[in-house]
Amino acid sequence: MKALLTFVLVASLAVAAGLAIEGVDGYVVFVVPPWRAQLSLTLFASLVVATVLVLYALLRLGSSLIALPRSLRNRREAWRLRRATHTLSQLVRAHVLGDVVRVHRLADRLSRYPDLSEAGAALATVTALDRGDESRAENWLARLQRWPDVRAVLEAEFGARCARPERLHAAMERLAELRGLPEATALRLRLEAAKREERWQEVLESARRLRALEAMDASETAALIRQAHLDDASSRLSLGVDLAAWWKRLPKEERYDPAFLVSLARLALDRGQGTQLRPILENALSKCWLPELVRLYPYCVEPGARQEALVRLEAWRLAHPEEPAVLEALVELCLELQLWGKAQDYLSQLRRVGADPAVLERFGSRLRAGTADRDGATLSAPRGVLE
């Protein structure tokens, strides 16, 4: 449309110019003694216009010829850039699809393009680290010369994944000197280093900060925090420190983590210090109902507090009448207290709610053994005692 409008405009101007000079009778005389030349004004104007056009065309041609080498160079660079961009896109695709052989082949091809060679080397390094290929990772890391921050991060990844603590520490020192590194990246690498060396307090601090930044998967963060707390609890159990006071100081979302509570209870029971868990379990079960904790509750009660614990379990049964875990705990506690009648009643209720047959068989065996011992003791008692 633009070309058509330009053509119409030029044609209109040409017609207007022709009509304007059609009635002009003037002439132009050039005198160079002894010569004299006379031209009509129309011819002179046409020659001037033609001369201007020819000069313009010659100037354009000359400038084009002068700029031709640069133009060809730019076109060649544009073609190379398109090829490099296509190679990079194929490299990213191969990396996502997990085509390791193609990743390394494309990264090697991309090394011919200086502007994008670092990107190819970085992706190839990540792929090699994911596959545990140390030699290839080393080779690609050596090519990362112009991206010191990326190289330091990948060096730290290499040290963490390949169990090279000296490389990890050296990379962490370089990262501490770098400016502009994202906080989440530095925290993640610090967490990897601390986890590798089992410095769980540092793991805890880094994981909490990453959770606040929403820079790590929530389940992974929770697992790390849980592991750090369990390590701390293990140390406290070894030292005989009050576990309940420590547990109450934990943040609420970490204190009532179901997986953490179950693991903590099992840890204390394995260490033979289940009685320290009783106030923790009672507090936790008042806030969040966890059947697995209820099953472990009888094993955390000291002998002198079993009657009190039985009353608490019966209150829980009223609140959760169809919960097998409460009935299992009641049967266990009644067997410990040698309340055979109550144990029989709760075992019958447990059968009605459809408990695990193996659990029913185990409780039934213990109940039969207990009642048999009681009957045997009664039959063997002296006559005076029976009277």
Image: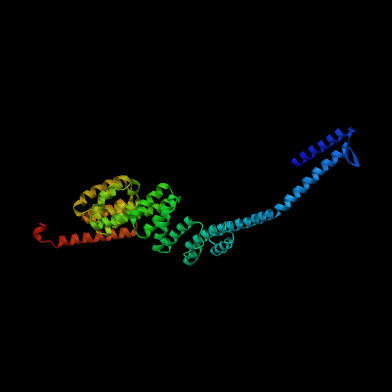
Q: Residue 371, position in %: x, y? A: 21, 59
In this rendered view, identify the residue nearer to me: 181 or 216: 181
In the current view of this chain or complex, which residue is farthest to the bottom?
135
Q: How many marks?
A: 0
- Most extreme residue toward the left is 384
Question: In front here: 167 or 289?
Answer: 167
Quadrant in which residue 196 is drawn: bottom left
How is the protein colored in the picture? Answer: rainbow
Looking at the image, residue 47 sits to the left or right of residue 287; the answer is right
Q: Report the residue that reaches farthest toward the front.
A: 33
Which residue is nearer to you in this view: 80 or 20? 20
- The answer to whether 31 is drawn above or below residue 293 in the figure is above
Compared to residue 136, the image places residue 9 above or below, namely above
Dividing the picture into quadrants, the one containing residue 368 is: bottom left
For residue 54, side relative to residue 259 (left or right): right
Quarter of the rendering containing residue 374: bottom left
Residue beneath the point at 21% across and 61% down: 372
In the rendered image, the quadrant that contains the C terminus is: bottom left
Q: Is residue 124 above or below residue 47?
A: below
Q: Position of residue 347 (x, y in %)?
A: 28, 54
Q: Examine the rendering and report whether any part of residue 42 can be seen.
A: yes
Please provide percent x and percent y for residue 202. Answer: 35, 54
Picture coordinates of residue 42, whole percent (x, y): 87, 37
From the viewer's perspective, is 265 left or right of 70?
left
Residue 343 visible to the viewer: no
Q: Is residue 126 above or below residue 12?
A: below
